[in-house]
Protein backbone atom coordinates (compact mmCIF):
# COMPACT_ATOMS: atom_id res chain seq x y z
CA UNK A 1 0.00 0.00 0.00
CA UNK A 2 1.40 3.33 -1.04
CA UNK A 3 0.63 6.48 0.90
CA UNK A 4 -1.20 9.35 -0.78
CA UNK A 5 0.69 12.63 -1.14
CA UNK A 6 -1.41 15.64 -2.02
CA UNK A 7 -0.34 18.44 -4.31
CA UNK A 8 -1.44 22.00 -3.70
CA UNK A 9 -0.91 24.57 -6.43
CA UNK A 10 -0.56 28.25 -5.61
CA UNK A 11 0.42 29.55 -9.06
CA UNK A 12 -2.62 31.84 -9.06
CA UNK A 13 -1.94 33.24 -5.58
CA UNK A 14 1.75 33.07 -4.62
CA UNK A 15 2.79 32.73 -8.28
CA UNK A 16 0.87 35.92 -9.04
CA UNK A 17 3.44 37.76 -6.89
CA UNK A 18 6.06 37.21 -9.61
CA UNK A 19 7.51 40.40 -11.01
CA UNK A 20 5.82 41.20 -14.29
CA UNK A 21 3.01 38.66 -13.87
CA UNK A 22 -0.52 40.02 -13.85
CA UNK A 23 -3.23 37.41 -14.33
CA UNK A 24 -6.58 38.40 -15.81
CA UNK A 25 -9.72 36.49 -14.92
CA UNK A 26 -9.47 34.64 -18.26
CA UNK A 27 -5.86 33.69 -17.44
CA UNK A 28 -6.86 32.40 -14.04
CA UNK A 29 -9.73 30.33 -15.39
CA UNK A 30 -7.57 28.84 -18.14
CA UNK A 31 -4.72 28.01 -15.73
CA UNK A 32 -7.20 26.45 -13.32
CA UNK A 33 -8.44 24.17 -16.08
CA UNK A 34 -4.87 23.17 -16.94
CA UNK A 35 -4.07 22.36 -13.32
CA UNK A 36 -7.28 20.40 -12.96
CA UNK A 37 -6.60 18.38 -16.10
CA UNK A 38 -3.11 17.68 -14.79
CA UNK A 39 -4.55 16.06 -11.66
CA UNK A 40 -3.55 18.60 -8.99
CA UNK A 41 -5.48 18.13 -5.73
CA UNK A 42 -5.88 21.74 -4.61
CA UNK A 43 -5.98 24.85 -6.75
CA UNK A 44 -5.59 28.07 -4.82
CA UNK A 45 -7.24 30.76 -6.89
CA UNK A 46 -6.32 33.90 -4.96
CA UNK A 47 -7.42 36.28 -2.32
CA UNK A 48 -11.18 37.06 -2.49
CA UNK A 49 -11.94 40.58 -1.37
CA UNK A 50 -8.40 41.78 -2.05
CA UNK A 51 -8.86 42.76 -5.70
CA UNK A 52 -11.67 42.72 -8.29
CA UNK A 53 -10.23 39.78 -10.29
CA UNK A 54 -10.10 37.47 -7.28
CA UNK A 55 -13.45 38.63 -5.99
CA UNK A 56 -14.95 37.80 -9.40
CA UNK A 57 -13.12 34.47 -9.54
CA UNK A 58 -14.64 33.43 -6.24
CA UNK A 59 -17.99 35.03 -7.06
CA UNK A 60 -19.32 31.75 -8.38
CA UNK A 61 -18.59 28.07 -7.80
CA UNK A 62 -16.03 26.65 -10.22
CA UNK A 63 -16.54 23.15 -11.55
CA UNK A 64 -13.23 21.47 -10.80
CA UNK A 65 -12.16 18.03 -9.67
CA UNK A 66 -9.51 19.80 -7.62
CA UNK A 67 -10.47 21.52 -4.39
CA UNK A 68 -10.98 25.19 -5.25
CA UNK A 69 -9.26 27.09 -2.47
CA UNK A 70 -9.36 30.70 -1.29
CA UNK A 71 -6.53 32.34 0.60
CA UNK A 72 -6.66 35.00 3.27
CA UNK A 73 -5.58 36.08 6.69
CA UNK A 74 -6.88 34.79 10.00
CA UNK A 75 -9.01 37.28 11.88
CA UNK A 76 -7.25 40.43 12.93
CA UNK A 77 -6.14 40.72 16.55
CA UNK A 78 -8.69 42.31 18.84
CA UNK A 79 -11.61 41.61 16.49
CA UNK A 80 -14.20 38.89 16.56
CA UNK A 81 -14.58 36.61 13.56
CA UNK A 82 -18.01 38.11 12.90
CA UNK A 83 -16.55 41.61 12.78
CA UNK A 84 -13.68 41.18 10.33
CA UNK A 85 -14.45 42.16 6.72
CA UNK A 86 -11.44 40.26 5.33
CA UNK A 87 -12.55 37.06 6.99
CA UNK A 88 -16.15 37.66 5.95
CA UNK A 89 -15.11 37.90 2.27
CA UNK A 90 -13.32 34.56 2.61
CA UNK A 91 -16.26 32.85 4.28
CA UNK A 92 -18.68 34.19 1.68
CA UNK A 93 -16.56 33.11 -1.28
CA UNK A 94 -17.45 30.05 -3.33
CA UNK A 95 -14.30 28.19 -2.33
CA UNK A 96 -14.53 24.62 -1.11
CA UNK A 97 -11.47 25.09 1.07
CA UNK A 98 -9.98 28.08 2.84
CA UNK A 99 -6.25 28.44 3.35
CA UNK A 100 -5.57 30.86 6.17
CA UNK A 101 -2.22 32.42 6.77
CA UNK A 102 -1.11 33.17 10.33
CA UNK A 103 2.11 34.26 11.97
CA UNK A 104 4.07 31.57 13.79
CA UNK A 105 7.26 33.49 14.60
CA UNK A 106 6.91 35.17 18.01
CA UNK A 107 8.99 38.15 16.84
CA UNK A 108 6.55 38.83 13.98
CA UNK A 109 3.56 38.49 16.28
CA UNK A 110 4.92 41.18 18.60
CA UNK A 111 6.47 43.52 16.05
CA UNK A 112 4.36 43.20 12.90
CA UNK A 113 0.99 42.27 14.40
CA UNK A 114 1.59 44.26 17.60
CA UNK A 115 -0.35 41.78 19.65
CA UNK A 116 0.23 39.11 22.28
CA UNK A 117 1.31 35.57 21.59
CA UNK A 118 -1.91 34.28 23.18
CA UNK A 119 -4.15 36.54 21.05
CA UNK A 120 -2.43 35.24 17.91
CA UNK A 121 -3.19 31.64 18.95
CA UNK A 122 -6.79 32.62 19.69
CA UNK A 123 -7.06 34.17 16.24
CA UNK A 124 -5.85 30.90 14.66
CA UNK A 125 -8.34 28.84 16.67
CA UNK A 126 -11.27 31.18 16.03
CA UNK A 127 -10.66 31.46 12.29
CA UNK A 128 -10.31 27.71 11.77
CA UNK A 129 -13.46 27.15 13.84
CA UNK A 130 -15.42 29.79 11.91
CA UNK A 131 -14.48 28.33 8.52
CA UNK A 132 -15.25 24.79 9.66
CA UNK A 133 -18.63 25.97 10.90
CA UNK A 134 -19.27 27.25 7.36
CA UNK A 135 -18.60 23.75 6.05
CA UNK A 136 -15.21 24.55 4.55
CA UNK A 137 -12.13 22.40 4.55
CA UNK A 138 -9.43 24.42 6.30
CA UNK A 139 -5.70 24.75 5.75
CA UNK A 140 -3.51 26.93 7.89
CA UNK A 141 -0.26 28.33 6.51
CA UNK A 142 2.20 28.93 9.37
CA UNK A 143 4.11 31.90 7.99
CA UNK A 144 7.87 32.00 8.70
CA UNK A 145 7.51 28.65 10.44
CA UNK A 146 11.12 27.53 10.10
CA UNK A 147 12.66 30.85 11.16
CA UNK A 148 10.07 31.01 13.94
CA UNK A 149 10.95 27.51 15.06
CA UNK A 150 14.64 28.37 15.19
CA UNK A 151 13.88 31.43 17.35
CA UNK A 152 11.20 29.95 19.60
CA UNK A 153 10.40 26.30 18.91
CA UNK A 154 7.65 25.93 21.48
CA UNK A 155 5.69 28.94 20.21
CA UNK A 156 5.95 27.89 16.55
CA UNK A 157 4.70 24.46 17.57
CA UNK A 158 1.89 26.02 19.60
CA UNK A 159 0.63 27.72 16.43
CA UNK A 160 0.68 24.45 14.49
CA UNK A 161 -0.98 22.58 17.33
CA UNK A 162 -3.67 25.27 17.76
CA UNK A 163 -4.66 24.93 14.09
CA UNK A 164 -4.70 21.15 14.26
CA UNK A 165 -6.68 21.06 17.50
CA UNK A 166 -9.26 23.46 16.05
CA UNK A 167 -9.79 21.05 13.15
CA UNK A 168 -7.60 22.28 10.30
CA UNK A 169 -7.25 19.54 7.69
CA UNK A 170 -3.73 20.69 6.87
CA UNK A 171 -1.17 22.58 8.89
CA UNK A 172 1.26 23.98 6.34
CA UNK A 173 4.80 24.82 7.36
CA UNK A 174 6.06 27.75 5.31
CA UNK A 175 9.66 28.64 4.60
CA UNK A 176 8.53 32.15 3.79
CA UNK A 177 11.99 33.69 3.43
CA UNK A 178 13.18 30.66 1.49
CA UNK A 179 16.47 30.56 3.36
CA UNK A 180 16.19 27.18 5.07
CA UNK A 181 18.34 24.24 4.04
CA UNK A 182 17.12 20.67 3.46
CA UNK A 183 18.77 19.22 6.59
CA UNK A 184 17.11 21.91 8.74
CA UNK A 185 13.72 21.37 7.13
CA UNK A 186 13.97 17.61 7.61
CA UNK A 187 14.94 17.93 11.29
CA UNK A 188 12.24 20.50 12.10
CA UNK A 189 9.44 18.66 10.28
CA UNK A 190 10.48 15.48 12.14
CA UNK A 191 9.83 17.36 15.40
CA UNK A 192 6.51 18.78 14.22
CA UNK A 193 5.08 15.39 13.24
CA UNK A 194 5.51 14.26 16.85
CA UNK A 195 2.70 16.73 17.66
CA UNK A 196 0.66 16.97 14.46
CA UNK A 197 0.26 13.77 12.42
CA UNK A 198 2.29 13.83 9.21
CA UNK A 199 -0.77 13.22 7.06
CA UNK A 200 -2.03 16.59 8.30
CA UNK A 201 1.24 18.46 7.61
CA UNK A 202 2.15 20.34 4.44
CA UNK A 203 5.29 22.09 3.20
CA UNK A 204 5.38 25.46 1.42
CA UNK A 205 8.94 26.24 0.34
CA UNK A 206 10.41 29.28 -1.38
CA UNK A 207 13.44 29.04 -3.59
CA UNK A 208 15.88 31.63 -2.28
CA UNK A 209 18.73 29.12 -2.00
CA UNK A 210 17.65 27.18 -5.12
CA UNK A 211 16.48 24.39 -2.81
CA UNK A 212 12.71 24.74 -2.65
CA UNK A 213 12.26 21.42 -4.45
CA UNK A 214 14.85 19.73 -2.24
CA UNK A 215 13.25 21.25 0.87
CA UNK A 216 9.86 19.92 -0.20
CA UNK A 217 11.26 16.41 -0.51
CA UNK A 218 13.12 16.77 2.80
CA UNK A 219 9.79 17.57 4.47
CA UNK A 220 8.16 14.54 2.84
CA UNK A 221 10.99 12.30 4.05
CA UNK A 222 10.36 13.59 7.56
CA UNK A 223 6.64 12.83 7.33
CA UNK A 224 4.80 15.76 5.66
CA UNK A 225 2.16 14.64 3.18
CA UNK A 226 1.19 17.78 1.28
CA UNK A 227 3.47 19.70 -1.05
CA UNK A 228 2.63 23.24 -2.08
CA UNK A 229 4.21 24.80 -5.13
CA UNK A 230 3.66 26.56 -8.43
CA UNK A 231 3.91 25.77 -12.14
CA UNK A 232 7.39 26.54 -13.45
CA UNK A 233 8.36 27.67 -9.94
CA UNK A 234 6.60 31.02 -10.38
CA UNK A 235 6.63 33.23 -7.31
CA UNK A 236 8.07 36.40 -5.88
CA UNK A 237 11.84 36.87 -5.59
CA UNK A 238 13.34 33.52 -6.63
CA UNK A 239 10.02 31.73 -6.83
CA UNK A 240 8.23 28.87 -5.09
CA UNK A 241 8.87 25.12 -5.16
CA UNK A 242 8.45 24.07 -8.79
CA UNK A 243 5.67 21.51 -9.17
CA UNK A 244 6.83 20.82 -12.72
CA UNK A 245 10.02 19.33 -11.25
CA UNK A 246 8.39 17.82 -8.17
CA UNK A 247 5.66 15.87 -9.98
CA UNK A 248 7.87 13.79 -12.28
CA UNK A 249 10.34 13.13 -9.47
CA UNK A 250 7.51 11.75 -7.34
CA UNK A 251 6.21 9.68 -10.25
CA UNK A 252 9.41 8.43 -11.80
CA UNK A 253 12.00 8.08 -9.03
CA UNK A 254 11.65 4.78 -7.17
CA UNK A 255 12.51 6.36 -3.82
CA UNK A 256 9.18 8.22 -3.97
CA UNK A 257 7.18 6.22 -6.51
CA UNK A 258 7.44 3.05 -4.41
CA UNK A 259 6.13 4.77 -1.30
CA UNK A 260 3.69 7.37 -2.53
CA UNK A 261 0.95 7.91 -5.01
CA UNK A 262 -0.29 11.28 -6.25
CA UNK A 263 -3.33 12.48 -8.15
CA UNK A 264 -1.40 12.80 -11.42
CA UNK A 265 -1.77 9.64 -13.53
CA UNK A 266 0.87 8.35 -15.95
CA UNK A 267 -1.32 9.63 -18.76
CA UNK A 268 -1.63 13.10 -17.20
CA UNK A 269 2.13 13.19 -16.63
CA UNK A 270 2.59 12.95 -20.41
CA UNK A 271 1.04 16.43 -20.68
CA UNK A 272 3.44 18.03 -18.21
CA UNK A 273 5.76 19.61 -20.78
CA UNK A 274 2.79 20.99 -22.67
CA UNK A 275 1.30 22.49 -19.50
CA UNK A 276 4.61 24.10 -18.61
CA UNK A 277 5.04 25.61 -22.08
CA UNK A 278 1.43 26.73 -22.32
CA UNK A 279 1.86 28.70 -19.09
CA UNK A 280 4.97 30.40 -20.49
CA UNK A 281 3.09 31.27 -23.66
CA UNK A 282 0.32 32.81 -21.60
CA UNK A 283 2.86 34.87 -19.66
CA UNK A 284 4.62 35.86 -22.85
CA UNK A 285 7.85 34.30 -21.64
CA UNK A 286 10.33 32.09 -23.37
CA UNK A 287 10.23 28.61 -21.89
CA UNK A 288 13.48 27.83 -20.06
CA UNK A 289 15.18 25.43 -22.42
CA UNK A 290 17.24 23.98 -19.59
CA UNK A 291 14.28 23.35 -17.28
CA UNK A 292 14.55 19.86 -15.74
CA UNK A 293 12.27 17.27 -17.38
CA UNK A 294 10.35 19.70 -19.62
CA UNK A 295 12.98 22.01 -21.15
CA UNK A 296 13.82 21.70 -24.81
CA UNK A 297 17.36 20.73 -23.87
CA UNK A 298 16.43 18.36 -21.04
CA UNK A 299 16.88 15.36 -23.33
CA UNK A 300 18.97 16.89 -26.10
CA UNK A 301 22.26 15.38 -27.08
CA UNK A 302 24.63 16.61 -29.69
CA UNK A 303 25.16 14.20 -32.51
CA UNK A 304 28.22 12.02 -32.31
CA UNK A 305 29.04 9.01 -30.25
CA UNK A 306 26.41 9.86 -27.67
CA UNK A 307 23.71 10.13 -30.28
CA UNK A 308 24.41 6.74 -31.77
CA UNK A 309 24.60 5.19 -28.31
CA UNK A 310 21.28 6.78 -27.42
CA UNK A 311 19.69 5.39 -30.56
CA UNK A 312 20.88 1.91 -29.62
CA UNK A 313 19.81 2.21 -26.01
CA UNK A 314 18.29 5.48 -24.72
CA UNK A 315 18.65 4.38 -21.10
CA UNK A 316 22.42 4.81 -21.37
CA UNK A 317 22.22 8.60 -21.36
CA UNK A 318 18.81 9.50 -19.95
CA UNK A 319 17.72 9.44 -16.32
CA UNK A 320 14.06 8.96 -17.27
CA UNK A 321 12.17 8.49 -20.53
CA UNK A 322 11.41 11.89 -22.10
CA UNK A 323 8.01 10.64 -23.34
CA UNK A 324 6.91 10.08 -19.76
CA UNK A 325 6.67 13.85 -19.23
CA UNK A 326 5.64 14.73 -22.80
CA UNK A 327 9.12 15.81 -23.77
CA UNK A 328 11.21 14.30 -26.51
CA UNK A 329 14.69 13.11 -27.17
CA UNK A 330 16.42 15.53 -29.47
CA UNK A 331 19.06 14.15 -31.77
CA UNK A 332 20.19 15.56 -35.02
CA UNK A 333 20.16 12.11 -36.60
CA UNK A 334 16.56 11.10 -36.06
CA UNK A 335 13.07 12.49 -36.17
CA UNK A 336 11.49 9.38 -34.73
CA UNK A 337 10.65 11.12 -31.47
CA UNK A 338 8.85 13.95 -33.27
CA UNK A 339 6.93 11.40 -35.30
CA UNK A 340 5.70 9.52 -32.24
CA UNK A 341 4.68 12.79 -30.56
CA UNK A 342 2.66 13.84 -33.60
CA UNK A 343 1.09 10.37 -33.82
CA UNK A 344 0.09 10.59 -30.16
CA UNK A 345 -1.47 13.98 -30.76
CA UNK A 346 -3.38 12.75 -33.82
CA UNK A 347 -4.65 9.85 -31.78
CA UNK A 348 -5.85 12.23 -29.09
CA UNK A 349 -7.76 14.27 -31.71
CA UNK A 350 -9.25 11.07 -33.06
CA UNK A 351 -7.49 11.00 -36.45
CA UNK A 352 -6.31 7.50 -37.29
CA UNK A 353 -3.16 7.46 -39.40
CA UNK A 354 -0.78 4.63 -40.10
CA UNK A 355 2.70 5.39 -38.81
CA UNK A 356 4.14 4.71 -42.28
CA UNK A 357 1.66 6.95 -44.06
CA UNK A 358 3.69 9.39 -46.23
CA UNK A 359 1.25 12.17 -45.29
CA UNK A 360 2.53 11.87 -41.74
CA UNK A 361 6.05 12.74 -42.92
CA UNK A 362 4.65 15.75 -44.78
CA UNK A 363 2.75 16.88 -41.69
CA UNK A 364 5.85 16.50 -39.56
CA UNK A 365 7.94 18.53 -42.00
CA UNK A 366 5.25 21.18 -42.17
CA UNK A 367 5.05 21.46 -38.37
CA UNK A 368 8.84 21.73 -38.12
CA UNK A 369 9.01 24.38 -40.83
CA UNK A 370 6.22 26.40 -39.29
CA UNK A 371 7.59 26.15 -35.78
CA UNK A 372 10.93 27.35 -37.10
CA UNK A 373 9.30 30.58 -38.29
CA UNK A 374 7.40 31.12 -35.06
CA UNK A 375 4.18 29.07 -34.97
CA UNK A 376 3.66 27.53 -31.54
CA UNK A 377 1.54 24.43 -31.91
CA UNK A 378 1.99 23.25 -28.35
CA UNK A 379 0.03 26.30 -27.28
CA UNK A 380 -2.39 26.31 -30.24
CA UNK A 381 -4.22 23.00 -30.17
CA UNK A 382 -6.91 24.03 -32.65
CA UNK A 383 -4.47 25.31 -35.27
CA UNK A 384 -2.52 22.07 -35.01
CA UNK A 385 -5.69 20.07 -35.47
CA UNK A 386 -6.64 22.09 -38.55
CA UNK A 387 -3.18 21.69 -40.02
CA UNK A 388 -3.35 17.94 -39.46
CA UNK A 389 -6.87 17.66 -40.85
CA UNK A 390 -5.87 19.67 -43.94
CA UNK A 391 -2.87 17.40 -44.58
CA UNK A 392 -5.16 14.41 -44.28
CA UNK A 393 -7.72 16.05 -46.52
CA UNK A 394 -10.67 16.42 -44.20
CA UNK A 395 -11.33 20.16 -43.93
CA UNK A 396 -14.06 21.40 -46.27
CA UNK A 397 -13.55 24.66 -48.09
CA UNK A 398 -16.22 26.62 -46.25
CA UNK A 399 -15.51 30.12 -47.48
CA UNK A 400 -12.86 32.39 -48.92
CA UNK A 401 -11.91 35.85 -47.79
CA UNK A 402 -11.11 37.43 -51.13
CA UNK A 403 -10.37 40.89 -49.75
CA UNK A 404 -10.11 42.83 -46.55
CA UNK A 405 -9.26 46.39 -45.69
CA UNK A 406 -8.61 47.83 -42.23
CA UNK A 407 -8.38 51.54 -41.64
CA UNK A 408 -7.25 53.38 -38.51
CA UNK A 409 -7.88 57.14 -38.32
CA UNK A 410 -6.92 59.70 -35.76
CA UNK A 411 -9.31 62.64 -35.71
CA UNK A 412 -8.90 65.75 -33.65
CA UNK A 413 -11.87 66.77 -31.52
CA UNK A 414 -11.86 70.56 -31.93
CA UNK A 415 -9.01 71.12 -29.57
CA UNK A 416 -10.20 68.53 -27.08
CA UNK A 417 -7.58 65.88 -27.74
CA UNK A 418 -8.28 63.34 -30.42
CA UNK A 419 -10.20 60.16 -31.07
CA UNK A 420 -9.28 56.98 -32.88
CA UNK A 421 -11.66 55.51 -35.41
CA UNK A 422 -11.17 52.02 -36.78
CA UNK A 423 -13.14 50.39 -39.56
CA UNK A 424 -12.80 47.15 -41.48
CA UNK A 425 -14.33 45.89 -44.70
CA UNK A 426 -14.27 42.19 -45.55
CA UNK A 427 -15.36 40.43 -48.75
CA UNK A 428 -16.29 36.79 -48.20
CA UNK A 429 -17.04 34.32 -50.98
CA UNK A 430 -19.27 31.40 -50.06
CA UNK A 431 -19.93 29.15 -53.03
CA UNK A 432 -21.10 31.55 -55.72
CA UNK A 433 -22.28 34.12 -53.24
CA UNK A 434 -20.22 37.21 -52.42
CA UNK A 435 -20.85 38.96 -49.10
CA UNK A 436 -19.44 42.34 -48.16
CA UNK A 437 -19.36 43.29 -44.49
CA UNK A 438 -18.15 46.48 -42.86
CA UNK A 439 -17.73 47.14 -39.16
CA UNK A 440 -16.25 49.54 -36.65
CA UNK A 441 -14.15 48.30 -33.79
CA UNK A 442 -12.16 49.53 -30.83
CA UNK A 443 -9.01 48.55 -32.70
CA UNK A 444 -8.00 47.07 -36.05
CA UNK A 445 -8.17 43.44 -34.96
CA UNK A 446 -11.52 43.91 -33.27
CA UNK A 447 -12.94 45.68 -36.34
CA UNK A 448 -11.67 42.89 -38.59
CA UNK A 449 -13.16 40.26 -36.30
CA UNK A 450 -16.54 41.97 -36.12
CA UNK A 451 -16.68 42.44 -39.91
CA UNK A 452 -15.62 38.86 -40.58
CA UNK A 453 -18.23 37.38 -38.28
CA UNK A 454 -21.03 39.82 -39.09
CA UNK A 455 -22.51 37.75 -41.88
CA UNK A 456 -21.12 34.40 -42.93
CA UNK A 457 -24.25 33.48 -44.88
CA UNK A 458 -25.29 29.89 -44.35
CA UNK A 459 -22.58 29.46 -41.72
CA UNK A 460 -23.74 32.27 -39.49
CA UNK A 461 -25.80 29.97 -37.25
CA UNK A 462 -22.80 27.72 -36.66
CA UNK A 463 -20.62 30.53 -35.32
CA UNK A 464 -23.23 32.34 -33.24
CA UNK A 465 -21.90 30.88 -29.98
CA UNK A 466 -18.26 31.65 -30.83
CA UNK A 467 -16.53 34.04 -28.44
CA UNK A 468 -12.98 35.32 -28.47
CA UNK A 469 -11.85 35.44 -24.88
CA UNK A 470 -8.15 36.18 -25.07
CA UNK A 471 -5.72 37.71 -27.52
CA UNK A 472 -1.96 37.60 -26.99
CA UNK A 473 0.78 39.11 -29.08
CA UNK A 474 4.45 38.36 -29.04
CA UNK A 475 7.25 39.80 -31.10
CA UNK A 476 9.74 37.12 -32.11
CA UNK A 477 13.17 37.80 -33.47
CA UNK A 478 13.89 35.05 -35.89
CA UNK A 479 17.06 35.77 -37.81
CA UNK A 480 17.22 39.35 -38.98
CA UNK A 481 13.51 40.09 -39.14
CA UNK A 482 11.08 40.62 -36.31
CA UNK A 483 7.85 38.68 -36.73
CA UNK A 484 4.67 38.80 -34.70
CA UNK A 485 2.96 35.78 -33.22
CA UNK A 486 -0.69 36.09 -32.24
CA UNK A 487 -2.49 33.54 -30.09
CA UNK A 488 -6.26 33.75 -29.85
CA UNK A 489 -8.26 31.81 -27.33
CA UNK A 490 -11.90 31.11 -28.15
CA UNK A 491 -14.82 29.40 -26.52
CA UNK A 492 -18.28 28.38 -27.65
CA UNK A 493 -21.73 27.65 -26.26
CA UNK A 494 -20.66 24.14 -25.22
CA UNK A 495 -17.94 25.54 -22.95
CA UNK A 496 -15.12 24.15 -25.09
CA UNK A 497 -11.98 26.28 -25.30
CA UNK A 498 -9.41 26.30 -28.05
CA UNK A 499 -6.40 28.31 -29.10
CA UNK A 500 -5.27 29.30 -32.58
CA UNK A 501 -2.09 30.89 -33.84
CA UNK A 502 -1.01 33.22 -36.60
CA UNK A 503 2.50 34.39 -37.51
CA UNK A 504 3.50 37.19 -39.83
CA UNK A 505 5.73 40.23 -40.11
CA UNK A 506 2.43 42.13 -40.00
CA UNK A 507 0.35 42.01 -36.83
CA UNK A 508 -2.96 42.35 -38.71
CA UNK A 509 -2.07 39.45 -40.96
CA UNK A 510 -1.01 37.32 -37.99
CA UNK A 511 -4.26 38.17 -36.21
CA UNK A 512 -6.27 37.42 -39.34
CA UNK A 513 -4.73 33.93 -39.60
CA UNK A 514 -5.53 33.15 -35.99
CA UNK A 515 -9.09 34.51 -36.38
CA UNK A 516 -9.67 32.44 -39.51
CA UNK A 517 -8.40 29.29 -37.82
CA UNK A 518 -10.71 29.86 -34.90
CA UNK A 519 -13.78 30.27 -37.15
CA UNK A 520 -12.88 27.30 -39.35
CA UNK A 521 -12.18 25.16 -36.28
CA UNK A 522 -15.61 26.03 -34.93
CA UNK A 523 -17.24 25.09 -38.27
CA UNK A 524 -15.38 21.76 -38.38
CA UNK A 525 -16.28 21.03 -34.77
CA UNK A 526 -19.94 21.86 -35.39
CA UNK A 527 -20.06 19.63 -38.45
CA UNK A 528 -20.95 22.50 -40.80
CA UNK A 529 -21.51 21.29 -44.40
CA UNK A 530 -19.06 22.23 -47.15
ZN1 LIG B 1 4.65 31.72 -0.16
Image (cartoon, grey):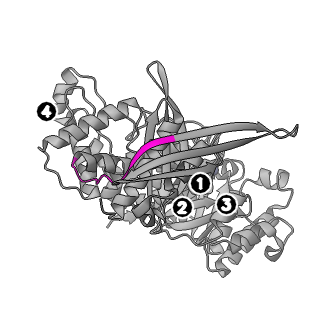
The residue at which mark 3 appears reads as: 54
> Quick one: label 2, few (<14), some, or many (20+) residues within 10 Å?
many
Pick whichever, 502 or 42, lies toward us.
502
Classify residue 411 as left or right of residue 26.
right
Q: Are marks 1 and 2 in contact (CB under 8 Å)?
A: yes
Residue at point 41%, 57% (across, down): 38
Is tag 2's residue or tag 3's residue first in the polypeptide sequence?
Answer: 2
Classify residue 215 as left or right of residue 352.
right
Magenta highlight on residue 394: yes
Q: Are marks 2 and 3 in contact (CB under 8 Å)?
A: no
| Residue 102 drawn at (x, y percent) | 71, 60
**Mark 1 or 4, which is nearer the eye?**
1
Residue 196 shows up from this direction = no
Whether 65 is drawn above or below 310: the answer is: below
Is tag 1's residue or tag 2's residue first in the polypeptide sequence?
Answer: 1
Magenta highlight on residue 520: no
The residue at which mark 1 appears reads as: 12
Is tag 1's residue or tag 4's residue first in the polypeptide sequence?
Answer: 1
**Mark 4 or 3, which is nearer the eye?**
3
Residue at point 46%, 18% (across, down): 480
The residue at which mark 2 appears reads as: 43
| Residue 52 drawn at (x, y percent) | 72, 59
Q: Are marks 4 and 3 in contact (CB under 8 Å)?
A: no
Is tag 4's residue or tag 3's residue first in the polypeptide sequence?
Answer: 3
The residue at which mark 4 appears reads as: 312
Quote the CA–CA distance across marks 4 and 3.
Answer: 52 Å
Residue bounds of the magenta highlight: 392-404
Quote the CA–CA distance across marks 1 and 2.
Answer: 8 Å
Which type of secondary structure does the marked residue at label 2 adopt? strand
Task: Return the mark for residue 375.
Answer: none
Quote the CA–CA distance across marks 1 and 3.
Answer: 10 Å
Amino acid sequence: MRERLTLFDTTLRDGAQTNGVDFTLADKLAIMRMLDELGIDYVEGGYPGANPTDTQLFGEPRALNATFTAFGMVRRPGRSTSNDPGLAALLESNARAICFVAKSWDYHVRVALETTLEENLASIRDSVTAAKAKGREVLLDCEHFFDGYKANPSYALDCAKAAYAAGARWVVLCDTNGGSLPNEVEAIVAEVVKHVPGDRVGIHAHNDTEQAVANSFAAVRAGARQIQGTLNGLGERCGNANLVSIIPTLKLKPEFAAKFEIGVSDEQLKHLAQVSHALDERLNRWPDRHAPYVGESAFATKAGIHASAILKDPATYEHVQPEAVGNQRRLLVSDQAGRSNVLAELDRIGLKVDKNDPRLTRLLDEVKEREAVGYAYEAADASFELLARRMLGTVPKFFDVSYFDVKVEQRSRNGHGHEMLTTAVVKVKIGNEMLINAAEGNGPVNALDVALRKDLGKYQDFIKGLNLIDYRVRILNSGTEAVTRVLIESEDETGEHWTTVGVSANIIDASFQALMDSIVYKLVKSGAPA
